[in-house]
Amino acid sequence: MAAEETADIVVIGGGMVGLASAIALRDRGLDVVLCDPGEARARTSYGNAGVVSRGSILPMASPALWGKLPAYLRNADRGLRLHHAHLPRILPYATHFLAAARTSRWRRAAAALLPLTSAAYPAHERLAARAGTNERLQQTGWLKTYRTQAAFEAAALEREILSHHRVAFEILDAAGLRDLEPALVRPFARAMLLTETGSVREPGRLIEACEALFAGIGGRQRRGSVERLTPEAGGWRVAHETGSVRARQVVLAAGAASGAIARTLGYRFAVAAERGYHRHYALHPESPPLTRPVLDTGAGSILSPMGDHRVRVLSGVELNARHAAPDHTQIEAASREAAGTLRLGGPLDNEPWLGSRPSTPDGMPVIGRAPRHDGLLFAFGHGHIGLSTGPITGEIVADLATGREPQVPVAPFAPDRLLGWPRLF
Ligand SMILES: Cc1cc2nc3c(=O)[nH]c(=O)nc-3n(C[C@H](O)[C@H](O)[C@H](O)COP(=O)(O)OP(=O)(O)OC[C@H]3O[C@@H](n4cnc5c(N)ncnc54)[C@H](O)[C@@H]3O)c2cc1C
């Protein structure tokens, strides 16, 4: 017979967001059960680029979208691969996305995200100190490189918004970039170094250490997917693969699976899985080390050092169903481009890794109480910045669950903004 137990609160999902929430809730003295299937590579938090940047305040739905749309629709832009048959299934997401791609909305999102991204690095430091992973977190800065002067000029609005919010950056010319990062052999025209940025080497190791930390402070973990979430008098019953838990509160932090789980309770969120791939390569033994993550804007991909002279090459966005078969087109193109940017040896993995960014169309996470159910908290939709903003989201979740005012304003992240269709004007 399946085991039945009780707790104060159940957290669904053990990626960066769920684990950080579970730890912060445990710190507040709550009896916490965390449910997750426990497959390390199934977590997007395992396979990302590890960038933790105060400057990550500019969502994908930018005003530049309109100029790029024809190329996006033809799959002629390296940063995005669209599976057209999937489009009808994400129509609410796509409609919200188009509505968000305006200068005024971009500026508003940046202002709303800044307190979250500003708190992200200190929250990572606090967590790493407790999890014993300080050496994995380094304040390296990160680089956005531009292959042409025209590409650099096209990003002027981004620099204007970052300057407006006093996010620190330096602009480098080709020689300055060569001096700073001699591992880069491609002649880039310009680069932007965002200095208030850390990077996590091998984010998967941080996740493992957080699991151990949670267990060490008395948290309970149940390996298995949550299959049913049922409201009951005074709380919830959460049924998972090996049993069930009764609790007063539930946190839904299941990354890209959260939309489908919320739907079983009648919430139809305009969210999507933005799939992405990575593959590791050895740097040539005679190459200088790569010392910080690099976004090659011309390739639409990121190169991130993972230690031991290894580089993780990460692809752009693929819009397709979460469980569709992998399509290696983008990671193969990203790897070819990477071979022209760094001196690389052969791939170190047999198969590229695939994960799904849990994405919202306006680039802001969903953090807040469920509008129609007591005792249900949403914490998902962190898109491209969930590794960095996961730890601070955990602290916010603990504030909300224990009736405290969150240290970061969460009104812009309210769930109801993504329920239903957008206001287009
Ligand atoms: C290529 C790529 C590069 C990226 N680079 C960066 C970066 O540099 N910096 C950054 O901040 N972010 C980056 N991201 C985004 C970041 O990885 C995600 O935003 C973040 O990992 C999301 O964390 P999460 O905890 O919400 O989801 P996940 O890590 O996916 O965790 C969700 C968990 O929920 C579990 N789950 C699913 N269904 C159920 C269920 N029914 N019951 C129980 N558990 C369930 C899953 O198994 C999983 O363990 C990148 C993403 C990609 C794909």
Image (spheres, rainbow, N blue to C red):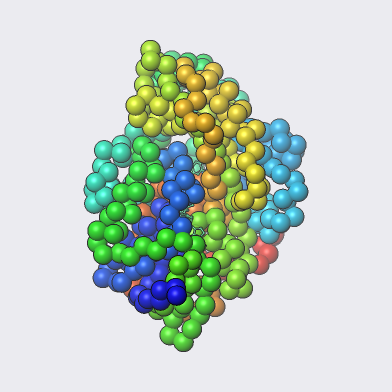
In this view of the protein, can residue 281 be seen by the observer? yes
Q: Is residue 188 above or below residue 128?
A: above
Labels in figure, total? 0
| Residue 390: x %, y % from top left | 40, 53
Residue drawn at point x = 54 percent, y = 35 percent: 352
Asked which quadrant contains residue 69, the reply is top right
The C terminus, quarter of image: bottom right
- Residue 86 to residue 334: above or below: below
The one nearer the camera, 159 or 192, is 192
Q: Is residue 219 left or right of residue 192?
A: left
Q: Residue at x 44, y 45 (%)?
A: 46
Q: What residue sits 37% from the left and 24% below the top?
A: 309
Vertical comparison of 400 with 180: above or below: below
Q: Is residue 345 left or right of residue 30?
A: right
Whole-percent x, y for residue 42 in the image: 49, 49
Would residue 101 be found to the left or right of residue 380 on screen? right
- Residue 293 percent coordinates (x, y): 42, 32
The one nearer the camera, 12 or 27, is 12
Q: Residue furthest top?
A: 286
Instruction: Answer with left or right where residue 301 lies relative to residue 49.
Output: right
Measured as percent of width and height from the top left, residue 403 is found at 35, 74
In the current view of this chain or complex, which residue is farthest to the front? 1
Q: What quarter of the picture does the N terminus occupy?
A: bottom left
Q: Is residue 108 visible?
A: no
Say which residue appears at 60% left-offset and 57% top-offset. 271
